[in-house]
Amino acid sequence: MTPQVEAVPARTCPVCGKETLNRHYSPKTKRYFYVCDDKQCVSPVTGKTVYYAVDKAGNPVIEYCPHDKAILEKKKGKYGFFWACPACRTIYRDKLGKPQFSGS
Ligand SMILES: [Zn+2]
Ligand SMILES: [Zn+2]
């Protein structure tokens, strides 16, 4: 299946509240991601730009750390995907595209 390349409607950025969350494609990782197009918009927790993973339907996945409400970053490691909190550095296992917060 080839990924869709057409533009998707902008979505509301959970950080700044503007309709500036847009989907982009990274040739480096060959993956889509969402980022807020407002360059001034950074995470209040880390002071850095927030990148969002994309779910199967093409929507941004916005997941918050239960400890400090920082937006989690989806990363790919040696053993597959995982979710990392940029603030407290907690790592969450990925379960069907979402971070797993409990042991169940
Ligand atoms: Zn924003
Ligand atoms: Zn955290």
Image: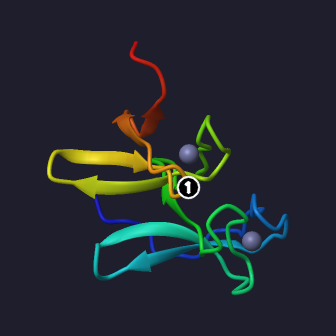
Circle 1: element type: loop
| Direction from residue 47 to residue 86 in the image, left or right | left
Residue 45 picture quarter: bottom right
The C terminus - image quarter: top left
User: Residue furthest toward the left?
Assistant: 78
| Direction from residue 21 to residue 63 in the image, left or right | left
The count of marks equals 1
In this view of the protein, which residue sits in the foreground, 11 or 104?
104
| Ligand 1 positioned in quadrant | bottom right
Residue drawn where x is 68% and y is 45% of the image: 69
The way the protein has been coloured in the rendering is: rainbow
In this view of the protein, which residue sits in the foreground, 46 or 3?
46
Q: Residue 43's spot in the image, x, y percent?
A: 68, 67
Q: Which amino acid, by three-letter code, is at mark 1? A: Ala
Q: Residue 19's spot in the image, x, y percent?
A: 81, 70
In this view of the protein, which residue sits in the foreground, 87 or 54?
87
Residue highlighted by disc 1: 87
User: Residue furthest toward the right?
Assistant: 17
| Direction from residue 82 to residue 54 in the image, left or right | right
Residue drawn where x is 41% and y is 47% of the image: 83
